[in-house]
Amino acid sequence: SSNMARTPKKAIIIGAGGQDGRLLFELLAKLGYSLIGVTRDSVITHKAQSPLKRIDIGNKKHVKKLISAFQADELYYLAAYHQSAQDKRLPVAQGLEKSYETNVFSLINCLEAIRLRSPRTKLFYASSCLVFGNSKQKVQDEQTPLLPDSPYAITKAAGMSACRLYREHFHVFAACGILYNHESAYRKDNFLSMKIIKAAIAAKKGSTAVTTVANLKARVDWGYAPDFVKAMRAILKLKQPDDFIIATGRAHTVADLAAVAFGHFKLDWKKYGLSQQKNS
């Protein structure tokens, strides 16, 4: 009915401060959604009022209050605890604990609040291709066995299982996206893609400093993050929830990425500031 068309869709984005959260917030705002975005230390809104000034997703009461007050059409769970290779390593048990808190327990707070207080809210959970671990299958699909082998991957796999449980036993619309690498201008400097781009810019400015990467031959399926957030929304528009791989299906080597980045400035990466670590 024409009346329906006038009510803007409502969405909650948990993890609105990260690359995907920022891109999704921009996309949905453009589409006229009323939005509540939860970041680590603040709440950002667009055409909406948040019931709380600060939301701790680990706090059941906070999550229940947010979800029952806002009655969102869609909830995107993009928050994740992840250590990049550049971060100071935590002891394994501590890393697992922190990963479980964000990637599983806080997700369960959302699933449970939806089940009890807002059953028509559709939830999207951002998982990762790392759940496949060192897969024997050259090309993974939704039926590929999960073989997680790091705290991050183990907890992402557990989050997917929690979504499946709520989907099959409690009829919560909980869909998972298994995301392969995806990049954008919002990537932090400690990501490989940004490291290479920064090296190309420095070389263009005349720098002779050398940036080392672990493995120039490593093959990665790199996608464009703005396309990935569109896929998340498309998944929530489906009639039935399920698990989906979000990827380009094409792998490129780290050297390919370097060739494109340096080539943008008409430079040959082999002559400028990029090399492989000797001991890798």
Image (cartoon, grey):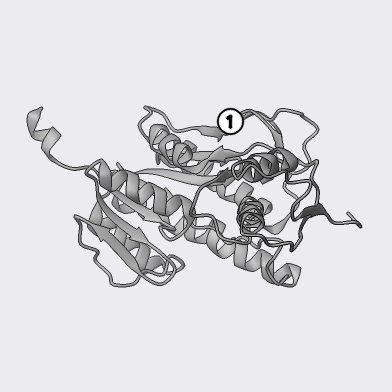
Q: Amino acid at mark 1?
A: Thr
- Split into 4 quadrants, where in the image is the C terminus? bottom right
Give the left or right position of residue 107, taking residue 144 as reference.
left
Which picture quadrant has residue 266? Answer: top right
Q: Nearer the viewer, residue 21 or 2?
A: 21
- The residue nearer to you, when weighing 12 against 191, is 191
Quarter of the image for residue 273 reads: bottom right
Q: Residue at x 28, y 43 (%)?
A: 73
Q: Residue at x 30, y 41 (%)?
A: 120
Residue closer to the observer: 205 or 250: 205
Is residue 250 visible in this depiction of the protein? yes
Secondary element under disc 1, as helix, strand or loop, is: loop
Q: Is residue 167 left or right of residue 193?
A: left
Res. 217 image quadrant: top right
- In the displayed structure, does residue 139 sit left or right of residue 215? left
Above or below for 1 versus 271: above
Label 1 belongs to which residue?
Answer: 248
The answer to whether any part of residue 112 appears in the image is no
